[in-house]
Image: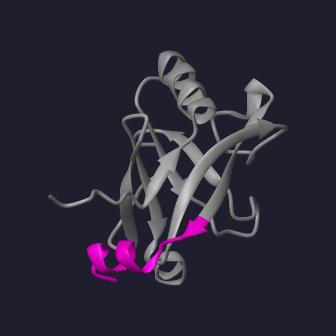
C-alpha cells in the first residue's frame, strides 16, 4: 500500500471560500504568485483567465481547482507541502477573493524523509 503525498492541500476555510467563488464565477484555478505586485500569495482566477505554460508546474488540485506554480519557484519549494488557508484582509489585486474581505494565504511544512522518498525528490 502506497501512501499518497499531496504537494498542495487546503484548509476547510479555504475549501469553503473556493466553493463560494466557484458558485459566483464558475470553474477557478490557482497560481502561486512569485511576482513583485502581489508578493508570494496564491492567486485565484477564473479558469482560462491566467495562461499557464511550459514554465508552470501543476502541484495538484484544491477544491477541484488546479493549483500551479512557476517551475523556478517550484524548484525552490519542492521539499515543502503548501497549505492554502484563508485570513481576513485584501488579497492580490487580481485574485477573485478580493471583494469577499478575505485573502488566500500560503502556509507550509517541510516534507519528512519518508515523504521525500515516496515523492522521489
Q: Kindly indicate the quadrant of the structure image that contains residue 58.
A: bottom left
Horizontal relation, residue 81 to residue 36: left or right: left
Q: Quadrant of the N terminus?
A: bottom left
Q: Kindly indicate the quadrant of the structure image that contains residue 96.
A: top right
Horizontal relation, residue 17 to residue 56: left or right: right
Foreground residue, 72 or 61? Answer: 61
66 relative to 88, above or below: below
Q: Kindly indicate the quadrant of the structure image that contains residue 38.
A: bottom right
59 relative to 87, above or below: below
Residue extending farthest to the top is: 23
The magenta span reads: 109-121
Q: Position of residue 23 (x, y in %)?
A: 49, 16
Q: Position of residue 107 (x, y in %)?
A: 66, 57
Foreground residue, 80 or 45? Answer: 80
Residue extending farthest to the left is: 1
Count of marks, rendered view: 0
Residue at the spot x=54%, y=17% of the render?
24
Horizontal relation, residue 79 to residue 6: left or right: right
Q: Is residue 101 magenta?
A: no
Residue at the spot x=26%, y=59% of the render?
3
43 relative to 56, above or below: above
Q: Position of residue 79 (x, y in %)?
A: 48, 78
What coloring was used for the rendering? one colour
Q: Position of residue 19 (x, y in %)?
A: 50, 23
Q: Is residue 118 magenta?
A: yes
Residue at the spot x=48%, y=65% of the render?
69
Residue at the spot x=34%, y=83% of the render?
121
Horizontal relation, residue 53 to residue 79: left or right: left
Amino acid at each position: 500500500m502506497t501512501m499518497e503525498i499531496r504537494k498542495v492541500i487546503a484548509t476547510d476555510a479555504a475549501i469553503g471560500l473556493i466553493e463560494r467563488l466557484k458558485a459566483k464565477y464558475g470553474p477557478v484555478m490557482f497560481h502561486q504568485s512569485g511576482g513583485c505586485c502581489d508578493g508570494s500569495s496564491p492567486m485565484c482566477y477564473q479558469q482560462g483567465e491566467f495562461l499557464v505554460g511550459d514554465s508552470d508546474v501543476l502541484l495538484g488540485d484544491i477544491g477541484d481547482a488546479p493549483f500551479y506554480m512557476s517551475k523556478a519557484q517550484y524548484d525552490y519549494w519542492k521539499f515543502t507541502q503548501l497549505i492554502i488557508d484563508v485570513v481576513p484582509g485584501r488579497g492580490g489585486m487580481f485574485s477573485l477573493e478580493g471583494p469577499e474581505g478575505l485573502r488566500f494565504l500560503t502556509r507550509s511544512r517541510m516534507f519528512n524523509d519518508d515523504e521525500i522518498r515516496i515523492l522521489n525528490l
